[in-house]
Image (spheres, coloured by chain):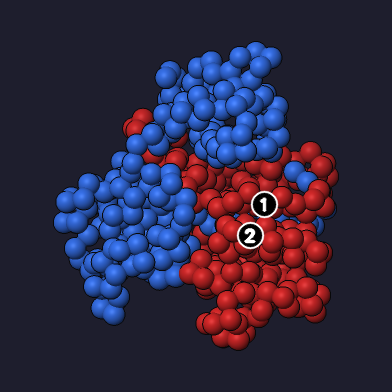
Chain colours: A red, B blue
């Protein structure tokens, strides 16, 4: 793998999306896929597919396409999802529970190892996946014990920054934030924010302009 | 507004993200913002900001920047979120409940007007937002009565396609799909899929390569 420092974030996002489509193709029995077909499935153009993959090497055969199994393996390696990652989640309301139950999480090697809340009524309860909800004050110790690498925040907005600070103090440098608020983190830490309403804006734009983009 | 048919989807997504940052800037008391500052906040480059906004006209003043209030209004108009949109949601488990409770939904003018499930234990229950959960068999009639324009799917994967078909039969042509499965829709319909794990892949990529993109 070369030139990784120059890879645009949009390329990484698309690789992740390509991966999901290739997985579905394999499930449907395909052995090969052309960049045109993959592009169509992912709603990008085929030059984009070739450019994105081109950052990481030569995976396809001209005129034939990409081997579905091989390309999956290559993208998994690039995205570093060819191994399991340990997650901890803070805020076990509906959203936190939904996240933990999400089918894709386990199939993609994301293991939710610890769940935290500050509500005494929730602490000590067992989640459907068998985790005992811990007091948020135990976060630091737990993260160290369980080798947590990614923190997930599903708290109300008012608690999100404090929880992020706890994760960061515990050397968790990657945060997935579902809370609709801005989180400030030092340069050593990275945050990905999930805001459902961005996707709704895309739908409203299309509905209003009555076009497909 | 001109040239809308040529606007890339990525531009629309970024407009939505710009809007959220500008809103936060206003909240923090800013009156003006430069394309450089906006770009930095949104983790893109300033030429991209200018290009994206340039599709829709001249909003900024050279050397001064963009008026925070004015730019918000313009982007809202472009995205067609300067009015309310009526949503219906199908699948009232943890994820569906979390979606309905999501604070950003109402503040952005997305009104969840109807909730559906097929579980007799849930049908008839009242959600925290005051909606009576309806039998999925009532979807068609309800959508017509309440002028629903966007359908949200938070069912298990096995039910997602059937629910999408119901929405489409009821002339709902925009679907936000949280279910981790592929939904097939006719050309008249559009689907935005939400997959949390794409964002986790970005974090794992960064963690593995120890870079910030």
Residue B123 found in image quarter: bottom left
Residue pointed to by mark 2: A160
Residue at 36% x, 30% y is A209
- In the rendered structure, find residue A183 and report the number of the disc placed on it: 1
Earlier along the polypeptide chain: callout 1 or callout 2? 2
Residue at 26% x, 66% y is B132
Residue at 61% x, 34% y is B29
Residue A83 found in image quarter: bottom right
Contact between marks 1 and 2 (CB within 8 A): the answer is yes
Q: Where is residue B85? Give x, y as percent.
A: 33, 43
The quadrant the C terminus of chain B occupies is: top right
Q: Residues within 10 Å of mark 2 (few under 14, many from 20)?
A: many
Q: Is residue A155 above or below residue B144?
A: below
Residue at 80% x, 67% y is A170
| Pointer 1 chain | A
Residue B207 found in image quarter: bottom right
Q: Where is residue B145? Give x, y as percent.
A: 17, 51
Cα distance in 3D space between marks 1 and 2 = 7 Å
Q: Is residue B77 above or below residue A10?
A: above
Q: Residues within 10 Å of mark 1 (few under 14, many from 20)?
A: some
Q: Where is residue B76? Give x, y as percent.
A: 44, 32
Q: Where is residue B73? Give x, y as percent.
A: 46, 28
């Amino acid at each position: 793998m070369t030139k990784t420092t120059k890879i645009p974030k949009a390329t990484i996002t698309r690789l992740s999306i390509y991966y999901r489509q290739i997985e579905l193709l394999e499930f449907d029995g395909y052995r090969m896929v052309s960049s045109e077909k993959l592009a169509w499935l992912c709603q990008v153009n085929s030059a984009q597919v070739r450019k994105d993959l081109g950052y990481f090497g030569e995976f396809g055969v001209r005129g034939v396409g990409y081997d579905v199994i091989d390309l999956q393996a290559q993208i998994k390696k690039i995205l570093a999802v060819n191994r399991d990652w340990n997650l901890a989640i803070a805020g076990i309301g509906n959203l936190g529970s939904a996240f933990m139950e999400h089918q894709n999480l386990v199939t993609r090697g994301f293991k939710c190892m610890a769940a935290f809340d500050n509500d005494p009524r929730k602490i000590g309860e067992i989640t459907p996946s068998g985790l005992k909800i811990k007091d948020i004050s135990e976060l630091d110790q737990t993260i160290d014990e369980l080798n947590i690498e990614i923190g997930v925040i599903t708290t109300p907005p008012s608690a999100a920054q404090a929880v992020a600070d706890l994760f960061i103090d515990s050397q968790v440098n990657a945060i997935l934030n579902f809370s609709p608020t801005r989180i400030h983190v030092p340069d050593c830490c990275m945050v990905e924010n999930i805001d459902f309403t961005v996707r709704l804006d895309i739908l409203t734009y299309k509905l209003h302009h009555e076009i497909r983009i």
